[in-house]
Image (cartoon, rainbow, N blue to C red):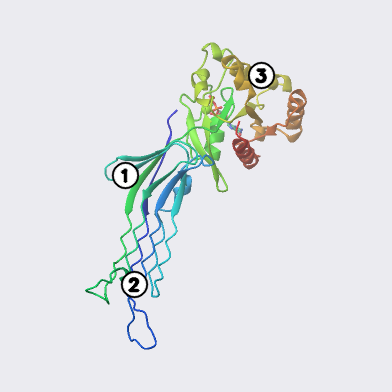
């Protein structure tokens, strides 16, 4: 399942501070020896892989990232303060290219891996370094070395954290279109989704990736329908959100049966699929009365001994709540 998140940014390391020209002042001598200190080192730019991040979304909206410059040296042999380094966190799996040549200069594959991309400029030497037998009073200090500016392209192949599952027509694509920028084709007949869609969902500062796959039908694991062709793509997600359309059912038994069909197919595909975290949503509740919804909710909760969430993607009912539950599940991993 290919979905690529890309951003272009400019990073620059800090300039080194210039060295100082200064002479010691003493009571009876107008000029003592040279005592100008060195400039501070410019800050460097590092990239660090962090498995708490799932997307490059936090780079959107800002284009340039700079480490601090080193400070000037000063008299009395005082060296300038070094500029702070800048550490930019990126998700594990981020590839960094030079924009101009397309050359890959970093490929961050392990959590905590840190690489130096732009070295800060060296501080210039102060005049205290240039005293010699022929020049007792050098009036010269080095300028600081310039920092480096790099135009970069960051690229991340997204892996889904959450998969939406359910029968055809359950409302999976509608939900992903409401919670993310994904714009899948939606239609009122089974099997509209032919290829999985991925969408990035934000909750406050946090983001995660949701996959919408074609619906699963009975005997999907034996090759019926489209669903299981895509099950391998969602094996690595931390959780499932299982959508059950209750709006068409005659009674809760029928709804529960349709839930079990999907569960069975998942587990026939691979038994471990049944152990993943699962949020169950009863969908399309905008077309039902509260009393009706409650009957279904109670039935499911008693049968499964866990909470289920009534949902309407169209009316926005419990959508925010679902996003928070998803985030919690993603953070717990699984
Ligand atoms: N009333 C109502 N209709 C909905 C809701 N969500 C989806 N629908 C409708 O249900 C139909 C199917 O929705 P989809 O989002 O395409 O369902 P899907 O689960 O992606 O279907 P497949 O891709 O076939 O598996 C469409 O006509 C939607 O407009 C909802 O919250 N309320
Ligand atoms: Mg769909």
Rendered image: mark on residue 260: 3
Mark 1 or 3, nearer chain start: 1
| Residue 102 x, y percent position in the rendering | 29, 40
Alpha carbon distance from label 1 to label 3: 50 Å
| Mark 1 Cβ inside 8 Å of ligand 2 | no
Q: Nearer the viewer, mark 1 or mark 2?
A: 2
Q: Nearer the viewer, residue 183 or 28?
A: 28
In front here: 39 or 11?
A: 39
Q: Residue at x 57, y 25 (%)?
A: 169
Q: Secondary structure at mark 2?
A: loop
- Check residue 321 in the rendering and tell me which mark sits there, or answer none: none
Disc number placed over residue 98 in the picture, else none: 1
Which residue lies most toward the front here?
Answer: 133
Question: Residue 314: x and y, percent?
Answer: 59, 37
Specify whether residue 191 is in view.
no
**Viewer-nearest residue: 330 or 19:** 19
- Marks 3 and 2 sit apart, C-alpha to C-alpha, by 77 Å
87 sits to left or right of 321: left
Q: Earlier in the sequence, mark 1 or mark 2?
A: 2
The residue singled out by tag 2 in the image is 20
* Quadrant of the frame with the N terminus: top left
Q: Nearer the viewer, residue 278 or 109?
A: 109
């Amino acid at each position: 399942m290919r979905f690529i998140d890309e951003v272009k940014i400019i990073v620059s390391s800090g300039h080194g501070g210039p060295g100082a020209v200064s002479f010691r002042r003493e009571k009876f001598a107008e000029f003592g020896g040279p005592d100008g200190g060195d400039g501070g080192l410019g800050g460097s730019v590092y990239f660090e892989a962090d498995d708490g991040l799932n997307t490059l979304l936090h780079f959107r909206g800002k284009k340039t990232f700079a480490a601090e410059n080193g400070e000037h040296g000063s008299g009395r042999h005082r060296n300038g303060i070094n500029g702070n380094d800048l550490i930019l966190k990126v998700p594990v799996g981020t590839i960094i290219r030079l924009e101009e040549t397309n050359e890959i200069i970093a490929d961050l594959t392990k959590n905590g891996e840190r690489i130096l991309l732009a070295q800060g400029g060296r501080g210039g030497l102060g005049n205290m370094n240039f005293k010699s037998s022929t020049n007792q009073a050098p009036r010269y200090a080095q300028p600081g070395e310039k920092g480096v500016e790099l135009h970069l392209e960051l690229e991340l192949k997204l892996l889904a954290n959450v998969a939406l599952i359910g029968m055809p027509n359950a409302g999976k694509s509608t939900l992903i279109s409401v919670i993310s920028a994904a714009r899948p084709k939606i239609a009122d007949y089974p099997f509209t989704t032919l290829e999985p869609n991925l969408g990035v969902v934000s909750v406050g500062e946090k983001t995660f990736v949701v996959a919408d796959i074609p619906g699963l039908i009975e005997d999907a694991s034996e090759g019926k329908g489209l669903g299981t062709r895509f099950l391998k793509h969602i094996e690595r997600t931390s959780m499932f959100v299982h959508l059950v359309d209750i709006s068409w059912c005659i009674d809760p038994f029928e709804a529960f049966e349709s839930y079990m069909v999907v569960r069975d197919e998942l587990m026939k595909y691979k038994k471990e699929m049944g152990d993943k975290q699962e949020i169950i949503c009863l969908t399309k509740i905008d077309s039902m009365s509260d009393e009706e919804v409650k009957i279904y909710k109670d039935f499911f909760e008693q049968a499964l001994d866990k909470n289920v969430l009534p949902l309407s993607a169209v009316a926005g009912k419990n959508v925010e709540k679902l996003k928070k539950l998803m985030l919690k599940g993603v953070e717990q991993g699984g």
